[in-house]
Amino acid sequence: MKKLLNTLYVMSEDSYLTLDGENVAVKRGDTVASRFPLHTLESILSFSYAGASPALMGACAERGVNLAFFSQRGRFLARVAGVTHGNVLLRQTQYRVSDDESKSVEIAKCFILGKVYNCQKSIERTRRDHGMRVDDDILKNASEKLKSYMPMIKNAPDRDTLRGYEGVAANAYFDAFDEMILGDKDTFKFTTRNRRPPLDPTNALLSFAYSILTNDCSSALEAVGLDSYVGFMHSSRSGRKSLALDLMEELRPCIADRFVLTLINNRRLHKKDFDFLESGAVIMSDGARKSFLKAWQEHKREEITHPFLDEKIEWGLVPFVQAQLLSRYLRDDLDAYPPFLWK
């Protein structure tokens, strides 16, 4: 269990939540592991298969405490929320901001600044950790380019201009991406980002990681009462989770990209784990997907210090904390949305 931003995160898969007087009791078997005063909580996010008592669900609905349930892999299942919780007002604000160019671009700039900053940090980490094994000139040049784009992003007057800066920054980053691949270069050589379908094993891994991360971001946004389909950077389109894609931007380099690089560089996957189709497409085998997902779940349990909160949390909670911060900004509880800036 961990409490952040007045949100209780229940991570133990066998935890059962009950109401004990004015407290939320977290039970594991017949033992009460911990108690939290209900009146101090805004949200309870449970990743346990055991669930919660009807009495607690009723109390949360009555008092406006958002109670959300997820699968153990982080897929959003359901939410219990009372009429006083304010999700309708939050979503109304979200829709108004999305339709307002000047307001939405300010949030979009935070997402893209976080993305470019984290891209640069990823490159610098490779330079620091593997300086003798890489072409430092290539990585240094890419890092300096990314750094130079940040002031332009901060001053972007509209979303179209911002998308242009994001595009050139992404090109600079992916132009140097192959230099960060240290294991089995014959199999995992990277030349350019491609998708639908991916044309090489590295792009297949990146696409799969982005798909999972999008799902995690969508679950996090739904948990705090935001509409994952209405974004600020990505335009609304039927069936597209635009806000989840927005939130994912800042998390791609430090969560998805570094994870893929770790799998490759630690030789967790090999050429035999991919199917090379006659059309040129490359897809992961069933065994590779299982290995990927197992390692992904293990990675999500690793701890980091959140740069804004200055508290230790698991990697898997980062999308949920960022969603909470975004909702607080939209409610005017924060002066600006603080993107996740990897340290």
Image (cartoon, rainbow, N blue to C red):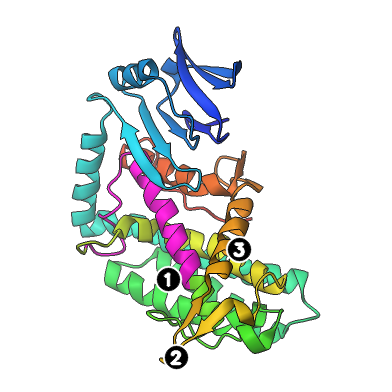
Check disc 3 and give the amino acid type.
Ser
Is 10 displayed left or right of 158 in the figure?
A: right
Crowding at dot 3, Cα within 10 Å, few <14 / some 14-19 / many 20+, comes out as some
Q: Which residues are magenta?
A: 207-236
Check disc 2 and give the amino acid type.
Gly
| Residue 107 point in image, percent of width and height | 35, 55
Q: Which residue is mark 2?
A: 280
Front in this rendered view, residue 262 or 289: 289
Q: Which residue is mark 3?
A: 291
Q: CA distance from mark 1 to mark 2?
A: 38 Å
Kindly tell me whether residue 110 is visible in this rendering: no
Q: CA distance from mark 2 to mark 3?
A: 24 Å
Q: Residue at x 48, y 35 (%)?
A: 49
- Report which quarter residue 63 is drawn in: top left
| Residue 248 point in image, percent of width and height | 43, 59
Mark 1 or mark 3: name the one nearer the start of the chain.
Answer: 1
